[in-house]
Amino acid sequence: MIGWLLNLVYLGLLVLVSPVLAYRAVRQGKYRHGLAEKLFGRGVHRVATGRCVWLHAVSVGEVLLLKPVIEELRRQSGVEIWLSTTTQTGHAVAREKYPECQVLYFPVDFTWSVRAALERVRPDVIGLVELELWPNFIRAAAGRGIPLVLINGRIGERSFRGYRLVRFLMRRVIGRLSAIGMQTPEYAQRIIELGAPRERVTVTGSVKFDGVRLEQDATRLAALRAELEIASHERVLLAGSTHAPEERVVLDCYAELQREFPELRLLIAPRHQERFDEVAALITAAGWPLGRRSQRKATSIDHREARRQPRSSDTCPEVILLDTLGELSDCWGLAEIAFVGGSLSQRGGQNMLEPCAAGAAVVVGPNTWNFRHAVELLVDAGGLVTVSDADELPRALRRLLSDASAADTLRSAARDAIKSQQGATRQTVAMLLDALRESGANSTSRSVADLTDERNVRTAA
């Protein structure tokens, strides 16, 4: 009954937002990919008979942070891993980054779609990343005796206030989770207040700290500089994971800084691929030559040598648009200074740990509530610069470009702070393996019970 009531609620919401969804599907090409898989749970069926773990990550950020978990899980257990996402971009990145995993779209939370998805995947354990708590999916999985583990969990202040309004529903959903790993003691306390059994909650730390690379691949970075035609004497400012209107702010900032630092080059990586053409138009409208990563081929040796020569003062440098998927994490290593987007808009910030670990001196805006714990850690350690608004951004970047010692101190402090927080992957994988053993024990118990029932029937007959 509860499942069908939720179906009616979801259908009502779908009808309300259908004009917006239709517009975006036609104009932006969104939502159409994997539609049958999302709405009806259709897709590839698992044929292997070994143990299987299903991990669910919503979008690109969650997909990328799973890298150390997937590697360690495969190293320790060799289980088959199915990885689901919600967004098309997340799906594309997952397929590229994890060719050894089966990638699928997560079903919309209708009873029929989650039932079909569970029947075709047949997982032994399900790991939900951060706070993906869909009632029908969780009820259906728990009803099949599949352990559900919340990993790298977090509950922001806004989300917590909203969930408290439906605490009676949250208690029923959270109570079906076998184990709950939260990033901080504060997040752990919040999920306990929402109804999680205290004995199932563990503070693991954040896998984000384990997923960043403190050592960079020098060969890969040299190849990227050549392919992007960045000369050895040039200094790189990378604005990554940007949202509107941050690209316009960064372009204005760059125009101001480039007059003072003519060797400065700008790379912009928008957060969402559907905005690549929009940002390209902004760059050309601002008067800069545009270089698109998707169109840039590896340059010849002669051309690379020519690009290493200093540019004349009246030559206008290209602004490079990183309009490819999955390359930003590599490109952070090119940056001397970096701005992380989502922090001057109202998106709550994007992951600043990767550029900090890569050795960039990092600046963010004031709106970073999605990464509050990481920001507090880095700021307290002296490893991150925060600005209060767009007007303060050029001043902060100018200080880092002008004072090499201060920038080096910032970089070193950030990397030390990240190193001090690593280790969450080990605890997270241990939780998944414990659930896998529990699943095996339950499966054996069910098999024994079924065999006993069969023998009793035969005896009675």
Image (cartoon, rainbow, N blue to C red):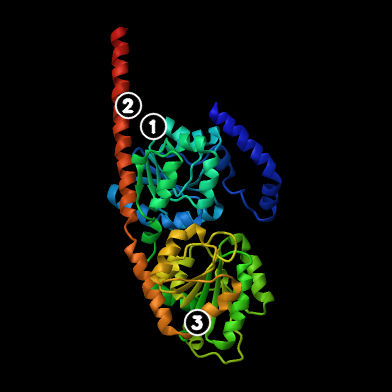
In which quadrant of the rendered image does the C terminus lie?
Answer: top left
The residue positioned 45% from the left and 71% from the top of the image is 384
Answer with left or right where residue 91 lies relative to residue 176.
right
* CB within 8 Å, label 3 to label 2: no
Residue 73 x/y as whole percent: 33, 50
Check disc 2 and report the residue beneath it. Answer: 446
The residues bearing labels 2 and 1 have C-alpha atoms spaced at a distance of 10 Å
The three-letter amino acid code for the residue at tag 1 is Gly
The kind of secondary structure element at disc 2 is: helix
In which quadrant of the rendered image does the N terminus lie?
Answer: top right
Check disc 1 and report the residue beneath it. Answer: 145
The three-letter amino acid code for the residue at tag 2 is Arg
> Is residue 119 visible to the viewer in this orientation of the structure?
no
Q: Nearer the viewer, mark 1 or mark 3?
A: 3
The kind of secondary structure element at disc 3 is: helix
* CB within 8 Å, label 2 to label 1: yes
* CB within 8 Å, label 1 to label 3: no
* Label 1 CA crowd tier, 10 Å (few <14, some 14–19, many 20+): some
Compare marks 1 and 3 and give the one earlier in the sequence.
1
Q: Nearer the viewer, mark 3 or mark 2?
A: 3
Answer with left or right where residue 135 lies relative to residue 98.
right
Compare marks 2 and 1 and give the one earlier in the sequence.
1
The residues bearing labels 3 and 2 have C-alpha atoms spaced at a distance of 66 Å
Q: Residue 399: give its label.
A: 3
Q: Residue 248: give its label.
A: none
The three-letter amino acid code for the residue at tag 3 is Arg
The residue positioned 38% from the left and 51% from the top of the image is 185
